[in-house]
Amino acid sequence: MDRAGLFSIGTIGKMFHLSVSSLRHYEAIGLLTPEYIDPESGYRYYSTRQFEVLNTIRYLRALDMPLQEISDFMENRDVERMEEKLLLQKQAVIEKQKRLKCIEQKIDNRLRQIADAKESVFDVVKLVQKKACRIVWVKDSLKIQEVLDIEEPLKKLEQQQAEALIFLGKVGVGISKEHLIDRNFGQYDGVFLMLDEEDTFSGDTDVLPEMLCVSIRFHGGHMEAAEQYGKLMDYVEEHKLTVNGFSREITMIDYGLTNDTEKFVTEISIPVTSRYKGGMKYAF
């Protein structure tokens, strides 16, 4: 065959800024068949009449249109068909923008959490106002003897979700009001997931109202928390406060961020009210 006016696959790739592997893939799915294939060498050649097709493919790919949709259009080329494809692709782009915005917000949240943890004042009990938040209860009770003890209930919950839990909120554990007052810090009475505002969760969630808390941050994780609970309850008694619900114990920096256990940061907060001043009542 006379190859005048034909272009090799490498030349076409350079002309249209496409890789040879992409052109071979287009051929494999029937989107763009070479004008001529040398039976001896297997080399692929393309003609100028295929330039318009290549330009259309490049244009639609630049719009992130799936190859299957492009192939469907090329088989049924029509103005109305193109309009329909573009409208559908526009909606797909809008949905992707929403997902990317959610990811951006999650990244910003995590950056703020890390910055907050790094700026912590450690081993000092403080009285703080905790903002309202949305949580998911994972398990009623749990005794943490090693790091992996908290993973089992989370994995069970994750199986029910379309979005991986690892990308959702912060994991927390809590001790009941009764056990806090009795200074029984050996077992947790609740495991929960604290969700960010943009999180979508399939299932029941609870909203914790804004509440006054005694709070402490320390280097370490759940297994080192018992001593810190003692400090918090000493503060509660010394300042004549009343425990008003479950504790919130959350690791702000743990194995998910670093292998250096000396950099671990955990915060414990216990909701309280004044015994004598008749202040606002908070519930957990």
Image (cartoon, rainbow, N blue to C red):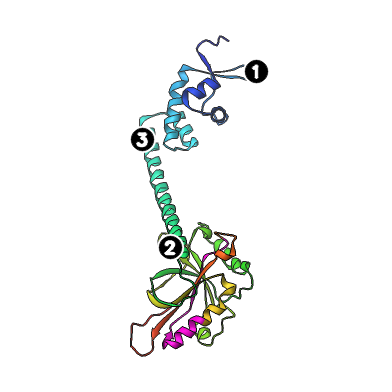
Type of amino acid under label 1: Ser
Q: CA distance from mark 1 to mark 3?
A: 41 Å
Type of amino acid under label 3: Glu
Q: Quadrant of the N terminus?
A: top right
Q: What x and y, as percent, mark residue 195? A: 45, 64
- The residue at the far right in this view is 40
On screen, residue 82 above or below 127? above
Q: Nearer the viewer, mark 1 or mark 3?
A: 1
Secondary structure under the numbered disc 3 in the rendered image: helix
Q: Which residue is the site of mark 2?
A: 196
34 or 111, which lies in front? 111
On screen, residue 86 above or below 242? above
Q: Quadrant of residue 112?
A: bottom left
Q: Nearer the viewer, mark 3 or mark 2?
A: 2
Q: Specify the segment rendered in magenta.
A: 231-255
Q: CA distance from mark 1 to mark 2?
A: 59 Å
Q: Which residue is the site of mark 3?
A: 83
Q: Earlier in the sequence, mark 1 or mark 3?
A: 1
Left or right: 78, with 164 as reference point: left
On screen, residue 11 above or below 21? above
